[in-house]
Image (cartoon, rainbow, N blue to C red):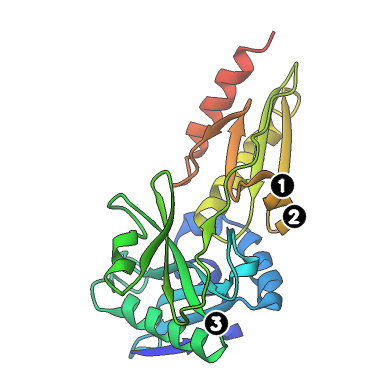
């Protein structure tokens, strides 16, 4: 197993969360690629785990916290660590300490870059990206927001604790139409799939729908709302993780359309 920095050879693999084989990932469009190109200019770092067959089986992506969806100073923020866990593609490579090796490589990199510590988000529930995994690696709780926990590891005792950025406001509806409001960042292909599906279905019913998209890869837009990725129908939030199917989205929109005067 070798941990390497991303190269152009593996950019497509990275932008599809190592699942180029997946028809669903192909639905995510170019949003992740655009996000990557934009954020590497401000210090986004990506490391990949390559196995003996030269296949990419794991990834970690992290950025100076000043450009992350949390508040902090002189730290780096981990968007996610992902080790391929499906039987298709390169197969299930989890439970082989690959995630630990990726985290250690990122921490070493951050130290060399002069960062005072690393922050990461995790879930309190037993799903993807559990915060307790980080705690086993020496991370401590910095903040909590619902089922999400912000954890961090200090390299310097003068480092300041990071915090979640709270939601500032939520969208409201427009009279006479179904209001569909999308907050689109681009960092996560799974959520990008949801955004692309919503866009296609809204186009189908465009006479009845007021479709608005906010690009939260623009930090000022993100800070204005405090929402990174989200879908709201008539001001009510709809979960997009995992990405809802076309059928589920269409059913929600038809239901809202039928209630129009």
Q: Which residue is at the front of the view, 79 or 247?
A: 79
Q: Residue at x 51, y 73 (%)?
A: 61
114 over 202 or under it: above or below: below
Element at label 3: loop
Q: Is residue 203 left or right of residue 149?
A: right
Q: Are marks 2 and 1 in contact (CB under 8 Å)?
A: yes
Q: Is residue 133 left or right of residue 37?
A: left
Looking at the image, tell me whether mark 3 or mark 2 is earlier in sequence order. 3
Q: Quadrant of the N terminus?
A: bottom left
Separation of disc 2 and disc 1 at Cα?
6 Å
Q: Residue at x 63, y 18 (%)?
A: 257
Q: Position of residue 170 (x, y in %)?
A: 64, 35
Q: Position of residue 90 (x, y in %)?
A: 35, 74
Separation of disc 3 and disc 2 at Cα?
24 Å
Q: Residue at x 60, y 51 (%)?
A: 228
Q: Position of residue 245 (x, y in %)?
A: 47, 40
Q: Quadrant of the C terminus?
A: top right
Q: Residues within 10 Å of mark 3 (few under 14, many from 20)?
A: many
Looking at the image, tell me whether mark 1 or mark 3 is earlier in sequence order. 3
Report the number of discs.
3
* Residue positioned most to the top: 261
Report the residue marked by disc 2. Answer: 220
* Residue positioned most to the left: 95
Q: Judge whether residue 116 can be spotted in this image.
A: yes
Q: Residues within 10 Å of mark 2 (few under 14, many from 20)?
A: few
In front of the other: label 3 or label 2? 3
Report the residue marked by disc 1. Answer: 224
Report the residue marked by disc 3. Answer: 115
Q: Residue at x 61, y 40 (%)?
A: 198
Element at label 1: helix
């Amino acid at each position: 197993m070798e941990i390497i920095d991303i190269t152009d050879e593996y950019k497509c693999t990275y932008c599809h969360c190592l699942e180029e084989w997946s028809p669903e990932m192909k639905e995510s469009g170019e949003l992740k690629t655009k996000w990557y190109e934009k954020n590497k200019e401000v210090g986004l770092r990506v490391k990949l785990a390559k196995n003996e067959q030269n296949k990419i089986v794991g990834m970690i992506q992290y950025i100076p916290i000043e450009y992350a969806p949390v508040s902090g100073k002189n730290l780096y923020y981990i968007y996610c660590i992902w080790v391929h866990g499906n039987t298709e593609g390169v197969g299930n490579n989890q439970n082989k300490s690959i995630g630990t090796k990726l985290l250690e490589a990122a921490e070493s990199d951050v130290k060399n870059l002069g960062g005072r510590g690393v922050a990461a988000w995790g879930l309190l529930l037993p799903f993807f990206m559990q915060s307790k995994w980080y705690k086993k690696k020496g991370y401590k709780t910095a903040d909590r927001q619902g089922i999400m926990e912000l954890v961090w590891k200090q390299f310097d005792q003068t480092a300041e604790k990071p915090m979640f950025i709270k939601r500032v406001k939520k969208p409201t509806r427009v009279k006479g139409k179904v209001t569909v409001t999308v907050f689109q960042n681009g960092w996560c292909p799974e959520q990008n799939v949801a955004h692309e599906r919503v866009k296609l279905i809204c186009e189908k019913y465009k006479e009845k729908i007021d479709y608005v998209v906010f690009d939260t890869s623009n930090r000022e837009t993100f800070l204005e709302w405090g929402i990174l990725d989200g879908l709201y129908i008539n001001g009510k939030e709809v979960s997009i993780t995992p990405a809802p199917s076309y059928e589920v989205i269409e059913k929600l929109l038809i239901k809202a359309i039928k209630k129009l005067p």
